[in-house]
């Protein structure tokens, strides 16, 4: 996983219109309607980032800049100089995501449909499912890379009641965990909602600390 991909996990969330069933049993096959509410060019997303118990203002902007049949490109800008821990973590990862002023400035692409979310954050740039909205506890989304290593995302919980605080609401969520190959990171934990997409991300570090963020979609 490259630095831009790590920061994307902190900085992105998605808003979806509905929840469709899949036609394939392949965990990395994603059906659904590609026309979603957040597919509109110009849609913006907002964060609430914490390093440990401290809120950090990254002066971030996240905006949809294009949509090609469900492949949605986001422009991400952020100033990570406000958090030494985030910057030190990014500096360990190969790849340059900084502009001339030392700020994050990158484009990232996801496949988004009414059935779920996929990213391409692997060395082979293969589609890898982040979540399917019909997921059951125990479901796994595995991807084996060309180097023989496997990335595994596992559904660990699913709520059937509105019990997760999200802005002015309480919402249902699906919780997923992903193992890490990144030095300094133990694991990733995501929460997803069938309407608002990825709504919360936690990054557990090997030193026992944590970076987390709410991700607020338009109209959330």
Image (tube, rainbow, N blue to C red):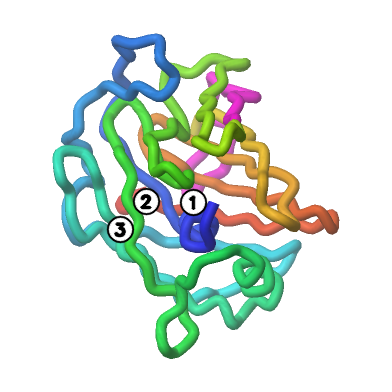
Q: How many marks?
A: 3
Few, some or many residues within 10 Å of mark 1 (<14, 14–19, 20+): few
| Residue 73's disc number | none
In front: label 2 or label 3:
3
Compared with 140, 143 (above or below) is below
Magenta stretch containing residue 38, yes or no?
no
Q: Which residue is mark 2?
A: 217
Q: Residue furthest front?
A: 147
Magenta-drawn segment: 152-170
Task: Identify the secondary structure beneath mark 3.
Answer: strand
Q: Name the residue rendered at 42%, 42% in the picture.
A: 124
Few, some or many residues within 10 Å of mark 2 (<14, 14–19, 20+): many
Q: Residue 81 at what x, y percent from top left?
A: 59, 82
Q: Nearer the viewer, residue 159 or 138?
A: 138
Query: Looking at the image, is mark 1 or mark 2 earlier in the sequence?
Result: 1
In front: label 3 or label 1:
3
Q: Residue furthest bottom?
A: 101
Q: Nearer the viewer, residue 57 or 12?
A: 12
Q: Residue 79 at what x, y percent from top left?
A: 50, 79
Query: Looking at the image, is mark 3 or mark 1 earlier in the sequence?
Result: 3
Q: Name the residue rendered at 39%, 37% in the picture.
A: 126
Magenta stretch containing residue 167, yes or no?
yes
Magenta stretch mostly in which secondary structure?
Answer: strand
Whether residue 68 sits left or right of residue 205 in the image: it is left
Task: Identify the secondary structure beneath mark 1.
Answer: loop
Q: CA distance from mark 2 to mark 3?
A: 13 Å
- Tell me where residue 140 sits by quadrant: top right
- Tell me where residue 149 sits by quadrant: top right
Whether residue 19 sits left or right of residue 160 in the image: it is left
| Residue 167's disc number | 1
Q: Which residue is mark 3?
A: 74
């Amino acid at each position: 996983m490259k630095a831009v991909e790590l920061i994307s996990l902190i900085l992105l969330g998605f808003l979806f219109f509905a929840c469709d069933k899949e036609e394939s049993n392949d965990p990395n096959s994603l059906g659904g309607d590609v026309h979603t509410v957040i597919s509109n060019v110009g849609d913006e997303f907002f964060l609430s980032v914490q390093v440990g118990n401290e809120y950090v203002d990254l002066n971030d902007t996240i905006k949809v800049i294009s949509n090609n049949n469900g492949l949605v490109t986001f422009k991400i800008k952020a100033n990570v100089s406000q958090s030494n821990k985030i910057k030190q973590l990014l500096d360990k990862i190969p790849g340059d995501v900084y502009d001339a002023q030392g700020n994050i400035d990158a484009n990232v692409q996801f496949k988004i449909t009414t059935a779920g979310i996929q990213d391409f954050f692997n060395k082979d740039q293969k589609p890898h499912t982040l979540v399917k909205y019909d997921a059951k506890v125990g479901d796994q989304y595995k991807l084996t890379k060309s180097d023989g290593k496997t990335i595994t995302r596992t559904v660990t919980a699913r709520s059937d009641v509105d019990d997760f605080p999200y802005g002015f609401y309480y919402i249902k969520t699906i919780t997923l965990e992903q193992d890490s190959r990144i030095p300094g990171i133990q694991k990733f934990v995501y929460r997803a909602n069938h309407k608002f997409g990825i709504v919360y991300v936690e990054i557990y570090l090997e030193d026992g600390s944590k970076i987390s963020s709410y991700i607020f979609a338009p109209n959330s």
